[in-house]
Every structure is written in structure tokens, then in C-alpha cells.
Image: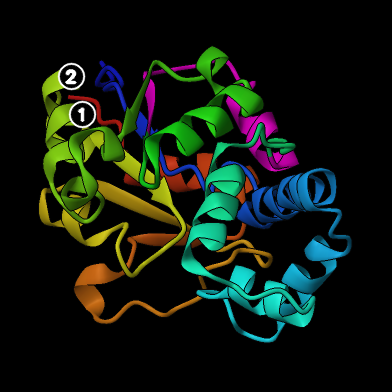
Amino acid sequence: MAMSAREQVIVFDLDDTLYLERDFVASGFSAVDCFLASHAGVEGFAVQCRAAAANGHSGHVFDQALAALGIEPDKALVAQLVAVYRGHKPDIALAPDARRYLERTRTGRRAIITDGPAATQQAKVKALGLEAFVDRVIFTDLWGRAFWKPHARAYETIEDWTGLEPDNLVYVADNPVKDFVTPRSRGWRTVMVAREARVHKSAAPDQAHQADIRINDLDELQDALRSFRPAETSP
């Protein structure tokens, strides 16, 4: 007789794995633009943000945009705009391939592990309707910044939740700098989704940080998962 199939639990990252992070960024820029227009009569903030981001000022976009509009980027103002950005209701949608995959009939449990300010990530999950597609979501920020990936706590939590051996767990994510080193060290399988439009395109710093398999989008995920399963055998 053939061996019965083992449960394979798929755990997803969120940003640039299930939707395009650039869409959230654009949504946030628009929200801050509307805030400044209504509260200070300032127009054109989103345009300046896009220009600053395109010029590589990813860590100081708001400062650069304000300066371009002739506004002193003092810390209090920037902090207020960051709060608007992080707290806005995001206008985002699942990537088409992600929706196709998630709407498939489930053969096992699914979960999400995501970093970032908890309220922001929770708003993204709600906007994307992901509660209907996964069984559990872990927002690492609820434990504190120190527990963001690559800290092991989220992966340990999934292991305890599933009760499965590590090689039955698969982490699907996009950023080799932080996403794969810990689950790989614990015996998980790993898949990198290398979307052309992803934000983070840094190479893995070493072999330990690389995923087992690299795919272009989630239309290729089923074949990747199948490759992890042991071949069925008969006595």
C-alpha cells in the first residue's frame, strides 16, 4: 500500500509575498497627502514622496518630501505624518497569483508570520481579507521589536501549534536577509517568492540565509511543495 500523505502546513510572510508592498506604500503616501492637504493646505506631498523614494531616500522620504515643498521637516511633524501613514486604512489587494493559490481547496493548515508595527500589519490583513484564508496570524510586534524575524519565537509558536515535525512546515517569504535562516536552522522547508516588483532585493548574505527553492510567484508554489514531499512507496 502507498504511504498516506502527511499534513504539510504552509506559513506565509505578508509583505511582497501575498500582496505588493509598493501598493501599501502608495496608499500610505496618498493618506498622508490628504492629511496635509486638509490640515495644512499643503498640496503635492505624495508626488514628492514618490520622487524621494525613486531617488533612493527610502529612510527619509518624508523629510525629503517636506523639504521639497519648502516645509521644515521637524521631528514632531514627521512623527505625526508617520503615524498617519502607519495608521491609515490601506487600499491594497492580494496579488492575483496569491488569490488563486489561497482560493484552492486546503489540504492542510495555513498561517502567517509578519513583522512590522502590529496595528499596521493587522490593518493589512483585514484589508486583504486574509482571515478567510488562513488559520492563524502571528504579528511578531505584539511581543516587541526584539521578536521580529529572524528571532525564533514565531517559528517555535507555529511548531507548538501544529504539533508536527519541522520538515512538515514550509515558510514562504520574500526576503533572504531575515526570512529563511531561522526556519531552515530548525528543519523547516523554505520557499522564496522573488516577485519582480518586490521592495527588498538584497541577496542572501550566505548559504544559510538562502531558501531551499526560489519561485517567481505563487502559481509555482504547488510544484515547489510537491518536491518537498517524500515519494510514495509500496511494500
Q: What span is in magenta?
A: 95-112
Residue 38 image point, x, y percent? 83, 43
Q: For numbered disc 1, what is the local secondary structure?
A: helix
Q: Is residue 16 visible?
A: no
Q: Is residue 80 above or below residue 111?
A: below
Residue type (three-letter) at the residue carrying disc 1: Ile
Rendered-image quadrant of the N terminus: top left
Rendered-image quadrant of the C terminus: top left
Q: Is residue 201 visible?
A: yes
Front-lying residue, 112 or 68? 68
Q: For numbered disc 2, what is the local secondary structure?
A: helix
Q: Is residue 223 above or below residue 201?
A: above
Front-lying residue, 181 or 235? 181
Residue at mark 2 to residue at mark 1: CA–CA distance: 5 Å
Residue 222 is one of the magenta-drawn residues: no
Front-lying residue, 219 or 53? 53
Residue type (three-letter) at the residue carrying disc 2: Trp
Residue 139 image point, x, y percent? 33, 33
- Residue at figure coordinates x 21%, y 62% from the top left: 181
Q: Quadrant of residue 127?
A: top right
Q: Which mark is residue 158?
A: 1
Q: Quadrant of residue 66?
A: bottom right
- Residue at figure coordinates x 71%, y 50% from the top left: 32
Residue 106 is one of the magenta-drawn residues: yes
Q: Which residue is mark 2?
A: 161
